[in-house]
Image (cartoon, grey):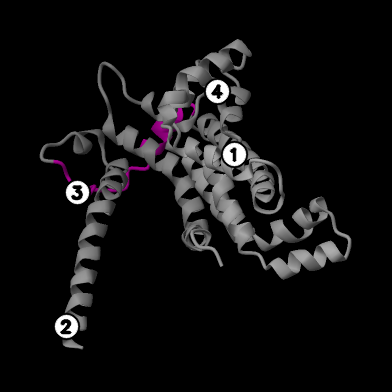
Amino acid sequence: MKRLSVSRTLAYLLSAVAAVFILFPFWITLSNAFMTEAESAAYPPKLWPTGLHLDNFSGVLASIPIVRFILNSFIVSSVITIGCLVTSCMAAYAFAFLRFPGKKIIFALFLSTMMIPWEVAVIPNYLTVRSWGWLDSYAGLTVPFLATAFGVFLMRQFFLQLPKELMEAARIDGCGHIRIFLRLAVPLSMPGLATLGVYSFLNHWNMYLWPLLVTSSEKMRTVQIGVSMLQFSEMTAWNLVMAGLVLVLLPSLIMLALGLGRLVGGLTAGALKG
């Protein structure tokens, strides 16, 4: 019993130390967002601002069209999330319940794409988007991400956990695959849909490389690209940069706070069958 108490105390201490290391960059960002330009450039760096200088946020709004960037990121992330949910559910249902030749081989090949780094596909995707005239457009920002192997795998695991007796009863009652999919499979897999939705939205909200490649005008820039515009070649006001980062982080932090429980629970449940 004593040994268990000691081990639990050590686990809590290690967790606390890890939390400090993880939260320290966030605190630096938040504190610098309320500092003056001189305080943010001071050496050694200060951990506390002398006051809440809210004019930094108005300075960000005056320097770059941050509201437009946030709107672009919200549109792109929302469209990708909705498309990913639709395509993943439909493909996952087919792999879970339909019978067709070579299903296991096709699913294995489908999952193998998860091992291919995204950077490998950047150039082919860019050439394809350019040939279709989708550069600097919402289509170019969203279409390449509307289907993911991870989403299909996650939803398939949820579908496989559904009671087989329920599916058989629905077939006996005369339900076809479309009705079973819409009335049973999707409603009973809402935790998986919520998990995939939160993951997809946060992942594409923080996307940097692809928007940098396919956008060229300010009206199509996303927040990750827009914040970098606060760094000037002559001088960088780090208090403005940090204030911009806080504005960018707020939507994703709110989304994460609202969906963290479903994200963790859904990933855990989707990892098991039965």
Q: Amino acid at mark 3?
A: Leu
Which circle marks residue 182 in the picture? none
The residue carrying pointer 1 sits among few (fewer than 14), some (14 to 19) or many (20 or more) residues within 10 Å by Cα, namely: few
Q: CA distance from mark 4 to mark 3?
A: 35 Å
The residue carrying pointer 3 sits among few (fewer than 14), some (14 to 19) or many (20 or more) residues within 10 Å by Cα, namely: some
Q: Residue at x 47, y 57 (%)?
A: 257
Q: Quadrant of residue 175?
A: bottom right
Q: CA distance from mark 1 to mark 2?
A: 51 Å
Q: CA distance from mark 4 to mark 2?
A: 59 Å
Q: Earlier in the sequence, mark 2 or mark 3?
A: 2
In-front residue for pair 99/119: 99
Q: Quadrant of the N terminus?
A: bottom left
Q: In the figure, is residue 262 to the left or right of 39?
A: right
Give the residue number, with chain letter if any, for mark 4.
220
Residue 62 among magenta residues: yes
Q: Is residue 55 visible?
A: no
The magenta span reads: 45-65
Above or below: residue 125 compared with residue 162: above
The mark closer to the camera, 4 or 2, is 2
Q: Amino acid at mark 1?
A: Ile
The residue at the far bottom in this view is: 1
Residue 218 % position (x, y): 51, 20
Q: Residue at x 60, y 52 (%)?
A: 155
Give the residue number, with chain letter if any, for mark 3.
47
Give the residue number, with chain letter if any, for mark 2.
3
The residue at the far right in this view is: 174
